[in-house]
Image: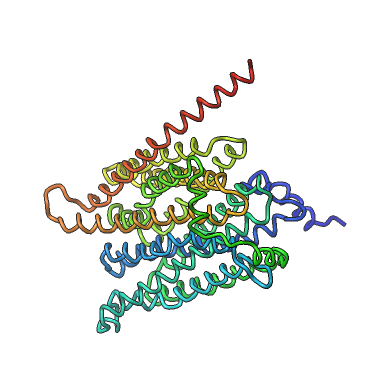
């Protein structure tokens, strides 16, 4: 009798390496099913990012009438924990446990922080906006409770993502580390796309009660998926724990200094900061821009996050193919930054009469550019790190990336509100604040291109010299 389930399974396994980027990292000892299960922690991170940066910023600004400056500050609060990603990664590298576990304790702590933040967030937002019976509540109570909820979620996301990526790299050989991190980020984007579509459908008929249900549901899903992701993933190595107990401890400053002395590392981190700031300012304004400048609904603007994530997934796939064949990360970081420039110009043009189709095309293009840039710089950071300092390298990349993104988010909201305050001035329209921010992003991406050009040219010249030397 023909077994349809076996046939379907074999077909899926055969297709996965071709259509799922980085799936070729799977081996008989580390099957794709286990890798995909581990990647569920990235799905929860993506869900949190969509909820905070996508859905909630639109709801707070448009439906709850919270000033954009206050929203931007709230969304930037996790920035306070971003520099600690470097320390968290280092601590997970050197953590000593009687069970021989290094990564799992930190991932679980981060999961609990995410759950706690989501548990209090919806009620804090309603108090902050003065909605319904909360109109008589003290303003400071809404601000402090909302700030606490965003801080908890942000700290949890930073901890889970940094240590989870380090755990993923522990499971594969050194040459496959960029692939496994790439796979984890693909699943982050998949989680963002699915979450954006689900949140958009659930909030199509927006009510405060529905908002509470969505956020509380996200808290339960986060804990459930992270538990499934962690189950029997990290091998218990008591010998390693014993060796770490007797080994001379390495100070964080010493380890960080050694990594920063690696040639090209400082320039790479500067490029990450400049480019991420260029891409990140739009995060807090893209959906309000769609709502106020183009008249899109909550459901439609929430789906913009899915479109942006789809573009980023395409960028990751393109970068994966090239970097897997030995291409230089700096070259594809440059291409990514350069791709974002026309994307933001298209977004600007959409509110000047070009229409919604160009807005969607520009959003997709910025996603592609961000994917190319993000994967290339992440691969570059991994290649600068020794095997026993992967957590530190990932933490450094994440710290710079998250810090730049947070500053970008806060700056975008503040600039938007300042220009809105000029309402009535000559030439100031509904899209003026957003247009100004998008132009600033174009300038920062151009600066990233300028920083990368000398490196790319130098590497190209070195490769040409090497080819000539071999031919002679």
| Quadrant into which the N terminus falls | bottom right
Instruction: Identify whether 391 is placed above or below 445.
Output: below
Is 408 placed left or right of 17 in the picture? Answer: left
The quarter holding residue 300 reads: bottom left
- Residue at 40% x, 60% y: name it: 54
Number of callouts: 0
**Residue 188: image location, x then y, percent:** 54, 56
**Colour scheme in the image?**
rainbow
Q: Quadrant of the C terminus?
A: top right
Q: Which residue lies furthest to the top in this view?
A: 472
Q: Is residue 132 left or right of residue 360?
A: left
> Where residue 469 sits: x, y (%)?
60, 19
Residue 257 x %, y %: 48, 51
Q: Nearer the viewer, residue 470 or 7?
A: 470
Residue 311 in sight from this viewpoint: no
Query: Would residue 402 be visible to someone looking at this image?
Result: yes
80 vs 113, nearest the viewer: 80
Q: Residue at x 22, y 49 (%)?
A: 432
Location of residue 409 (image quadrant)? bottom left
Of residues 138 and 363, the one nearer the viewer is 138
Quarter of the figure with residue 140: bottom left
Q: Is residue 25 above or below residue 125?
A: above
Percent coordinates x, y for residue 45 in the rendering:
51, 62
Could you say which is closer to the camera, residue 102 or residue 8? 102
């Amino acid at each position: 009798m023909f077994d349809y389930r076996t046939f379907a399974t074999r077909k899926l396994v055969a297709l996965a390496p071709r259509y799922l980027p980085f799936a070729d990292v799977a081996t008989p000892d580390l099957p794709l099913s286990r890798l995909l299960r581990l990647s569920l922690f990235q799905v929860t991170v993506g869900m949190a990012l969509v909820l905070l940066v996508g859905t909630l910023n639109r709801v707070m600004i448009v439906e709850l009438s919270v000033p954009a400056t206050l929203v931007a500050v709230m969304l930037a609060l996790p920035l306070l924990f971003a520099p600690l990603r470097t320390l968290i990664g280092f601590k997970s590298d050197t953590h000593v446990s009687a069970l021989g576990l290094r990564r799992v304790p930190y991932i679980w702590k981060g999961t609990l922080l995410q759950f706690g933040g989501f548990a209090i967030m919806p009620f804090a937002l309603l108090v902050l906006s003065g909605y319904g019976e909360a109109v008589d509540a003290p303003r400071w109570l809404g601000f402090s409770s909302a700030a606490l909820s965003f801080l908890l979620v942000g700290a949890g996301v930073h901890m889970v993502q940094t240590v989870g990526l380090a755990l993923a790299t522990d499971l594969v050989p050194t040459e496959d580390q960029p692939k496994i991190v790439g796979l984890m980020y693909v699943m982050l984007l998949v989680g963002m796309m699915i979450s954006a579509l689900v949140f958009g459908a659930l909030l199509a008929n927006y009510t405060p009660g529905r908002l509470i249900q969505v956020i509380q549901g996200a808290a339960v899903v986060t804990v459930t998926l992270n538990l499934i992701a962690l189950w029997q993933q990290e091998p218990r190595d008591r010998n390693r724990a014993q060796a770490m107990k007797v080994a001379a401890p390495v100070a964080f400053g010493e380890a960080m200094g050694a990594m920063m002395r690696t040639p090209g590392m400082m320039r790479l981190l500067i490029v990450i900061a400049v480019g991420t700031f260029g891409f990140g300012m739009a995060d807090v304004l893209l959906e309000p821009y769609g709502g106020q400048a183009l008249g899109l609904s909550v459901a439609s603007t929430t789906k913009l996050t899915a479109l942006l994530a789809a573009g980023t997934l395409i960028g990751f796939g393109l970068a994966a193919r090239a970097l897997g064949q030995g291409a230089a990360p700096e070259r594809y970081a440059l291409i990514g930054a350069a791709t974002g420039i026309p994307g933001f110009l298209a977004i600007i043009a959409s509110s000047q009469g070009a229409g919604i189709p160009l807005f969607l095309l520009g959003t997709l293009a910025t996603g592609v550019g961000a994917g190319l840039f993000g994967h290339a710089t992440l691969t570059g950071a991994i290649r600068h790190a020794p095997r026993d300092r992967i957590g530190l390298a990932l933490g450094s990349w994440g710290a710079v990336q998250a810090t730049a993104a947070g500053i970008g988010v806060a700056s975008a909201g503040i600039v938007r509100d300042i220009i809105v305050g000029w309402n009535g001035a000559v030439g100031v329209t509904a899209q003026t604040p957003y247009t100004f921010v998008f132009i600033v992003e174009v300038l920062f991406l151009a600066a990233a291109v300028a920083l990368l050009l000398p490196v790319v040219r130098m590497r190209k010249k070195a490769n040409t010299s090497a080819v000539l030397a071999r031919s002679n």
